[in-house]
Image (cartoon, rainbow, N blue to C red):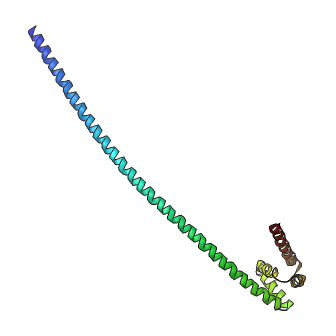
């Protein structure tokens, strides 16, 4: 019986030692997991800071692009105004030249322009000429061209009337 008690005591000590070893291993694993968690948190915090830095840089780039875009739009608008003014001056000079030319020469020039697909330029010149001169020119142009120009004139007149009202 004493052997049984000693044997029981030895087994009990062995079990207690095994439990302590297991607890030590669990504690070690727990510490490793905490260390990994801390490393991951540090990694994600670092990445979050990088993300915020990149986000700020991208926002600054976007602001710069918008400012450049606005500047380009402004330059485009200014250039368009200059171009429109040049076109008006050229058209005015052409109109005064056509007013001074003989009717036959003007009609030949207009016919050539129309044949080259520049009917809009002919129209722009004609709307700046006196009505009397325009009527003489329209009588000499072919029927199809005269009709087209008259339609354009009517459209412009209707638009002008709408804007005035």
Residue at 12% of width from left, 11% of height from top?
5
User: Residue at 48% across / 63% down in the picture?
Assistant: 61
Q: Quadrant of residue 57?
A: bottom left
Q: From this view, report whether residue 72 is shown above or below residue 32.
A: below
51 left or right of 118? left
Q: Position of residue 145 (x, y in %)?
A: 85, 78
- From the image, which quarter does the C terminus lie in? bottom right
Q: Which of 129/148 is in front?
A: 129
x, y percent for residue 155? 83, 70
Count the labels in the image: 0
Residue, x 65% and y 79% (percent of image)? 82
Q: Check the image and report above or below for 161 versus 5.
A: below
Please, which residue is most extreme toward the front here? 165
Report if residue 117 is visible in the image.
no
Q: Is residue 151 above or below residue 99?
A: above
Left/right of residue 61 with respect to residue 74 in the rendered view: left
Residue 32 vs 65, above or below: the answer is above
When asked about the image quadrant of residue 140, the answer is bottom right
Q: Quadrant of the N terminus?
A: top left
Whether residue 48 is visible, yes or no, is yes
Q: Quadrant of residue 32?
A: top left
Is 147 placed left or right of 65 in the picture?
right
Q: Position of residue 39 (x, y in %)?
A: 31, 45
Q: Give coordinates of residue 114: x percent, y percent.
A: 79, 81
**Front one among 11 and 83:** 83
Instruction: Give the residue furthest to the left.
Output: 2
């Amino acid at each position: 019986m004493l052997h049984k008690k000693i044997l029981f005591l030895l087994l009990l000590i062995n079990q207690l030692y095994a439990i302590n070893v297991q607890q030590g291993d669990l504690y070690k694993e727990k510490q490793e997991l905490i260390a990994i968690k801390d490393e991951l948190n540090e990694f994600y915090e670092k990445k979050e800071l990088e993300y915020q830095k990149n986000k700020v840089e991208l926002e600054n780039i976007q602001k710069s692009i918008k400012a450049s875009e606005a500047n380009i739009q402004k330059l485009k608008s200014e250039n368009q105004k200059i171009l429109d003014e040049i076109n008006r001056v050229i058209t005015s000079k052409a109109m005064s030249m056509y007013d001074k030319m003989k009717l036959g020469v003007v009609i030949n020039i207009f016919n050539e322009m129309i044949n080259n697909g520049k009917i809009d330029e002919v129209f722009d010149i004609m709307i700046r000429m006196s009505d009397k001169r325009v009527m003489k020119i329209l009588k000499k142009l072919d029927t199809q061209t005269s009709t087209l120009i008259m339609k354009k004139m009517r459209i412009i007149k209707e638009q002008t009337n709408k804007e005035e009202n």
